[in-house]
Image (cartoon, rainbow, N blue to C red):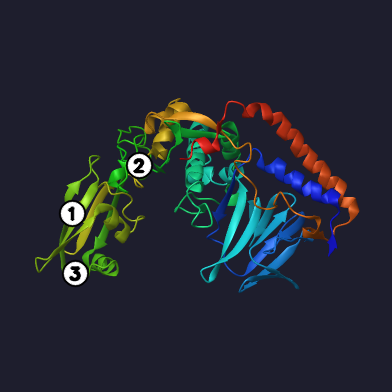
Amino acid sequence: MKVLQKFSLFIFIFLLSVSSSHAMDLKIKLTRVKAPYVFHAQSATYIKDGNEDIFFIDDSPTLKISLRGKKIFLGKNSFFLPVTLYASENRFYINGKGYRGRLYINPVDGGYNFLNVLDIEDYLKGVVTKEMPANWPLEAIKAQSIIARTYAIYKATRSEDKGFDLYDSTLDQVYYGIEGESDTGLMAVRATKDMILLHNGKIIKSFYHSTSGGRTELPEMVWGEKYPYLTSITCNFDRASPAFYWEYKISKRNLENLLRKAGYPGRNLKRIKTLRYTPSGRNKMMRVMYQNRSYVDIPGTDFRQIVGNGKLKSTLFHVVSRADSIFFNGRGSGHGVGLCQWGARGMAEKGKTYQQIIKKYYKNIEINKISYVHGEAMSDFIEKEIDDNTFKQKKSKNDKGDILSSFIEKADEQDLNEESERGKIPLKDIVK
């Protein structure tokens, strides 16, 4: 493979400085990507391998990916892991699903992580209307955008040990890449660009949930940690939620089996009662009693997980024991902490702004803009200091002009945005 000329080396370094000056890259673990793996791009594609060498792959390639040990096989070619696959149009497809940014693959614990590395604003485009329906009022979706951005930055600045920043699932925020994007989601993300939530000048942990059931929960009742900006408040705006009221019935035998799998081996379940409630009325401690007069006490959040979060939609429920079954009558959906999404919808429908929505659920916070300038967030695709021999390719000289033109367009856009960076808060000032 032929070495790129210094002119092209300059282009790659120039791209780094343009793309990272006003951006924060996130590494998202793609949990839904399963073998067999097929990578596709609709533009010129490059790979950086584990030796830090960069190769040109092809224009608009479709590649079957095989992984063995510390190597990746793309057709007849093999490369040492970890690798980054980068398409010049800044989007790729893996197993038919489209994503912005680039694909990073690395070996871990006998398997492989598939990570989507992309700008935080591009990430949010694939999150916002997977977490909140696209046909909801725009002000509610704007609030969701700011909260999701805040949550992502909070987690990303505390994720060094994992090797990635966020899961693409409910373990963090639901992210579906390009498939998850919508017109209203794009509008909300653009309208709130760089906006985050601060308390006393520091970024907050912006929890949110589906439906409060009339009152939000204190975080210390769920995770044992207090946050001064998260309190328990009355929410009168979420009654339209289909989960505002719910019911669930389970046989005693099935519940015994679930408890046994969770490490509670009692038999002949008799009844269940609530020992203690949280200040918001949720179940803090449950007692499971058996026919032989033995019993076991289980925290309400653990009990909900044992039965199933989809079955017991929240811990805000009343329990009734019958001859062969246990009945649950409940309200709300989710852990109950922070923003109530259905409450946000109800407020927006009554003409409330995204600022009013946010400040109802998070106390004594500021909505401010974050700045990623001066190297606060850097792309890990191409290193700044690299010698000519690192770059290898097969591309013709005629393509260089088009590549340079696209980079110059990005530089012009950066210049236009330079003025808007003034007055924003640097990332390094808010994360500790």
Q: Which residue is mark 3?
A: 266
Question: Is 19 drawn above or below residue 323 in the view shown?
Answer: above
Q: Which residue is mark 2?
A: 337
Q: Which residue is mark 1?
A: 320
Mark 2 Cα-neighbour bin, 10 Å: few <14, some 14–19, many ≥20: many
Viewer-nearest residue: 62 or 328: 62
The quadrant of the picture occupied by the N terminus is bottom right
Q: Is residue 170 left or right of residue 383?
A: left
**Residue found at x 53% / y 42%:** 128
Residue 420 is situated, as x and y percent measured from the top left of the image, at: 64, 27
Callout 2: helix, strand or loop? loop
Disc nearer the start of the sequence (3/1): 3
Question: Is 69 drawn above or below residue 122 in the view shown?
Answer: below
**Residue found at x 15% / y 60%:** 271
Disc nearer the start of the sequence (3/2): 3
Dot 2 amino acid type: Val
Residue 188 is situated, as x and y percent measured from the top left of the image, at: 56, 35
Whole-number angstrom distance, CA of label 2 to CA of label 1? 26 Å
Callout 1: helix, strand or loop? strand
Mark 3 Cα-neighbour bin, 10 Å: few <14, some 14–19, many ≥20: some
Residue 199 position by quadrant: top left
